[in-house]
Amino acid sequence: MSQTTSIADASPNSVDATDTRTAFRTCPLCEAGCGLELTIKGSQVVRIRGDRDDVFSHGFICPKGSTLKQLHDDPDRVRKPLVKRNGVHVEVEWAEAWQVVEQGLNGVIERHGRESIATYLGNPGAHSLSAMMFNRVLLQSIGTRHRYSASTVDQMPRQVAAAYVFGTAVSVPIPDLDRTDYLMILGANPYASNGSLCTAPDFPGRIEAIRARGGKLVVVDPRRSRTVEEADEWLAIRPGADALLLMSIVNVLFTDGLADPGPKVAALLNGMEELRELSAPFTPEAVAPATGLDPIVVRRIAHELAAAPTATVYGRIGTTTTEFGTTASWLIDAVNILTGNLDRPGGAMFTLPVAGGASTRGASGTGSGFKTGRGHTRVRNLPEIMGEYPAAAMAEEMTEPGPGQLRAMITVAGNPVLSTPNSTRLDEALAQLEFMVSVDMYLNETTRHADVILPPPSQLQRGHYDLLLLQFAVRNVANYSPAPLPLDAGQPDEWEVLATLAAVLQGQGPDADPAIVDELAISGLVRHAVSDRNSPIYGRDADEILTALAATGHRGPERMLDFMLRTGPYGDQFGVNPQAVSLQTLIDHPHGVDFGALEPRLPEILRTPSGRIELAAPVLVADVERLAVAMQTLAEQPLVLVGRRHLRSNNSWMHNIEVLVKGKPRCTLHVHPDDAAELGLVHGGYARITSRVGSVEAPVEVTDDIRPGVVSLPHGWGHGVEGARLRVAAERAGVNSNVLSDHQAIDPLSGTSVLNGIPVSVEPVAVVVSV
Ligand SMILES: Nc1nc2c(c(=O)[nH]1)N[C@H]1C(S)=C(S)[C@@H](COP(=O)(O)OP(=O)(O)OC[C@H]3O[C@@H](n4cnc5c(=O)[nH]c(N)nc54)[C@H](O)[C@@H]3O)O[C@H]1N2
Ligand SMILES: Nc1nc2c(c(=O)[nH]1)N[C@H]1C(S)=C(S)[C@@H](COP(=O)(O)OP(=O)(O)OC[C@H]3O[C@@H](n4cnc5c(=O)[nH]c(N)nc54)[C@H](O)[C@@H]3O)O[C@H]1N2
Ligand code: SF4
Ligand SMILES: [Mo]
């Protein structure tokens, strides 16, 4: 592909082999987005450390950040397309790979139609500028409603709740970590994860600062996590009961006369009286058997939240990937609102993203609101939510015969065989497909099923701007990094892979030119904006804007980003405000640009049809009936499984990096000593864990860092399967915890899987030691 070669040749970073230089690159591995300083000698990265001048991370990194070098150098990383021949993946040239892709996908389309193709978009795509810009183009080119992603095993409930309450799925209130006096965390462990839906490099340092200035940290978690160790108070809740705890806090706020949203929010609030009535039965005493928490403590915490000068409640994975994910997320908003902490410094605030986004577009203060159910899955009739179907439904859509059966799959940066529920079932379903393509850098548990694997360049060979996660940052920050290393000869950029795939699906043949797709995409964006009344470039000449963009020399995702920055809230609006932001501004500031602490955004941010905050949106209110039933059912569950994350793991895909996985095995079952005694488990022994859908065996760690009645196994393990190429990971394979998670168990409001609070039985297994 000629355009590929020319990009590699033209790279501003290509250097003389004797040169040593410094490059700056934001780490794309998690949501913290730390600035990295790379020392590069010739084409070799010799050192990676934290960028002390980064405006947001100030030099902080975790042990994963520096391993971008090992990732780049990993001999197992796929560097050339792989095509499966007689069950074995062999390297081919790009031209040949595209022919196989074209024949495979066209064959499926001819035989079964476009609706028989599914897509699964994985987590690293959310950190890839290429994927953020071109996945959309790809999805449009396929023309299928069968869109799946990691969102429905993750944050979808938080987004759905925000959409009902504030109007868009990205209007997520962010805890104002740096100014709060009181932080209550539910189901998140930022000391391991470094935060999520709260972009805050050095989250631990920001927590320590809260306590240093006399503030308080309360953590709600069934485990004594690293974050709990740093907390003033630990509420060891029973899994799945957070919505009940939160509703009981709402109850106390109302009954004790503490509910006071403050004048600005009160004037914009619908549904306060309705929520008061809804919360009436949920006293701390009534929910205690389900939550396992002392009602006296809960009452005190409710009073503390109301009395603190500022307070903010924040919930993540342990609240979203449960049966009441959406309802819990809504009630987090409710507590922040009722304690007067919404949209004020130190409370829960809204980011004003520099590259814009749904919360900055359209008419300010009002919108069309949020709807689901544009389409339903064939087998279980599950509704579309935010343009996708639940990941938990993928397998049955592939295996259940009949019209509309899925026959092909395209994965981009995803490993659903390890990440989504009832993995065994999905693993078998993928094996039955007629055709599968994966855009991925590893031959792993999922991509081993692919007929063709199309590799992106390494993370260090791509430019970066965290388009999605900077929308959830604790400061208004922008940071773009150009690719530190040039592309390998013949290697297309990730956006070119995605654009070519899109073109092939549009019927342009295996020689399709991604540049044409790119031109059409940017032209579409610009033409849409100039005809959009609410755009800052409304009424301008589209060709003039396109010419200005072309003059920068940027193409692909960089050009789209330039357009978004320039039409965003801080943008130069193409000449209107020349001092303001464009991509060039960010190139000139390699350590990022900080636009300051979050500022109040009400009522401008609202996009609800009423133009008000919907504290009692009908869909959310309707779920309270189910919550009332849970007061009983949750109290009766004997033993449940939760997950956990480790600082040195990153979901399923960084286990092939030796420096990260060495040491003690981490894929172990944590069991409380009381449970161990009752179940006959011993520290260092093995246990068989069985759920409704599967069974795995794992080594046991007996620890009182977990509440009785709960066991914990991390996800993302279970390597060493046949056909994968992960030599380091295979040596410490671990087991796949999602063999145990049940595809039937979902939060109905968001389609999100229940990955925490899975009923299990556990028994000892005698390990046969060979002599
Ligand atoms: N090192 C590392 N960092 C990561 C990742 C990683 O895999 N490794 N993944 C990244 C991604 S994709 C995400 S989404 C974020 C996630 O970031 P976090 O949400 O902080 O994720 P976890 O560390 O899994 O923390 C979830 C916590 O919820 C607790 N929990 C389980 N069930 C319940 C429950 O019912 N109620 C309550 N209150 N707590 C419960 C668990 O014990 C655990 O401590 O992390 C990101 N960062
Ligand atoms: N039981 C349980 N299950 C969980 C969770 C849990 O807490 N408990 N957490 C859930 C969460 S929060 C998430 S986000 C999901 C993650 O679920 P997934 O996104 O499905 O899985 P990952 O492990 O992130 O796998 C990422 C894949 O992308 C590839 N990859 C990495 N970088 C790139 C890139 O730049 N481009 C491309 N094209 N490919 C790349 C990797 O090789 C790997 O195959 O897992 C979920 N599953
Ligand atoms: S905390 Fe996240 S962004 Fe920062 S270095 Fe570690 S993995 Fe990278
Ligand atoms: Mo995630």
Image (cartoon, rainbow, N blue to C red):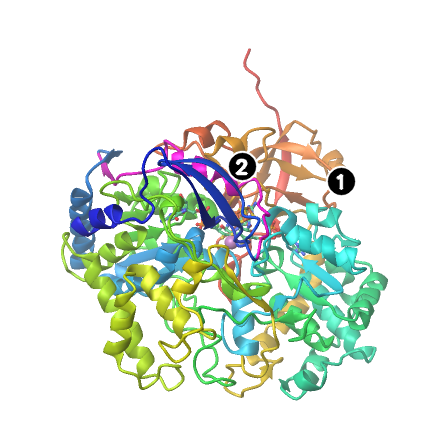
Say whether residue 225 is left or right of residue 67.
Answer: right
Density class for disc 1 (Cα within 10 Å; few <14, some 14-19, many ≥20) is some
Residue that appears at 67% across and 85% down: 264
Asked if residue 112 can be seen in this view, the reply is no
Q: Quadrant of the C terminus?
A: top right
Q: Nearer the viewer, mark 2 or mark 1?
A: 1
Question: Mark 1 is on which residue type?
Answer: Asp
Q: Residue shown at 38%/73% (left/top)?
A: 374
Seen from the viewer's position, the closer of residues 531 and 150 is 531
Q: Is residue 663 above or below residue 269?
A: above
Question: Which of the labelled discs sits on residue 696, or is there none?
Answer: 2
Q: Which residue is mark 1?
A: 704
Dot 2 and dot 1 residues touching (CB under 8 Å) = no
| 334 to the left or right of 386 | right
Q: Is mark 1 within 8 Å of ligand 1?
A: no
Q: Residue at point 54% right, 48% down?
A: 51
Q: Is residue 701 magenta?
A: no
For the magenta stretch, what is the residue range? 56-85
**Nearer the N terminus, badge 2 or badge 1?**
2
The label number, if any, that marks residue 419 in the structure image: none
Viewer can see residue 413: yes
Q: Secondary structure at mark 2?
A: strand
Q: Real-space Cα distance between discs 2 and 1?
A: 23 Å
Residue 439, percent from left and from top: 32, 48
- Marker count (numbered): 2
